[in-house]
Amino acid sequence: EAQVTQNPRYLITVTGKKLTVTCSQNMNHEYMSWYRQDPGLGLRQIYYSMNVEVTDKGDVPEGYKVSRKEKRNFPLILESPSPNQTSLYFCATSGGQKQFFGPGTRLTVL
Amino acid sequence: GENVEQHPSTLSVQEGDSAVIKCTYSDSASNYFPWYKQELGKRPQLIIDIRSNVGEKKDQRIAVTLNKTAKHFSLHITETQPEDSAVYFCAASLVHFGNEKLTFGTGTRLTIIP
């Protein structure tokens, strides 16, 4: 079954404590992306990756890092989380422009 | 960059009636327009999409129309059912230097009244 998975699904943390949200896909897609969803703002792209070791910034990259060491995994790293990064995060993978989203990670930074 | 506007932000329709959600985009080079349905607490799910070389596409009770000249596209849901209640997002996409970024509208909360 084609899947995009994210972990953790829910996370409450404190300002400055490094965290990683994992994303994994089994669809063999080259393109992966991270979005954040905030009320009234829709979904906005944070980072994307066109292939292994190829990543670039989206519209709202400040405060985030990513890596793409394997085709199936695309983790999102928050080195020093701040309260304005409290949001709902979605990983997405794309085949032929059709993007499929992971289940989401609800992050709260206190 | 691309900008997508979506209207209305909320929509209530009687069960069995039709619902229409409209979006406009700014970049005439955008060539792919998907619609996503997001139920409470769930991920956005692709329900229908259209490419710029097509004017209309139907899938059972759902249809999307695209007017490239006016740069707007619409989602039409006929014979609405309670399970159609959700937030719907339109998006526009142009592959730019390999980035398949979706630019989303701000969403329409559709409520079907039984």
Image (cartoon, helix red, strand yellow):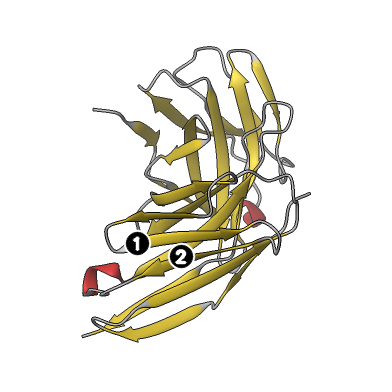
Residue B96 position by quadrant:
top right
Q: Position of residue A13 (x, y in %)?
A: 51, 47
Given residues A60 and B86, the one toward you in this image is B86
What label sits on residue B62 in the rendered view? Answer: 1
The residue depicted at 39 percent of the width and 39 percent of the height is A8
Given residues B43 and A66, the one toward you in this image is B43
Given residues B17 and B83, the one toward you in this image is B17
Question: Can you name the residue that lies furthest to the right here?
Answer: B1
Given residues A6 and B18, the one toward you in this image is B18
The residue depicted at 45 percent of the width and 74 percent of the height is B20
The residue depicted at 39 percent of the width and 35 percent of the height is A7
For the residue marked with disc 1, what is the amino acid? Ile
Q: Position of residue B73 (x, y in %)?
A: 57, 62
For the residue marked with disc 2, what is the amino acid? Leu
Q: Are marks 1 and 2 in contact (CB under 8 Å)?
A: yes
Residue at the disc numbered 2: B75
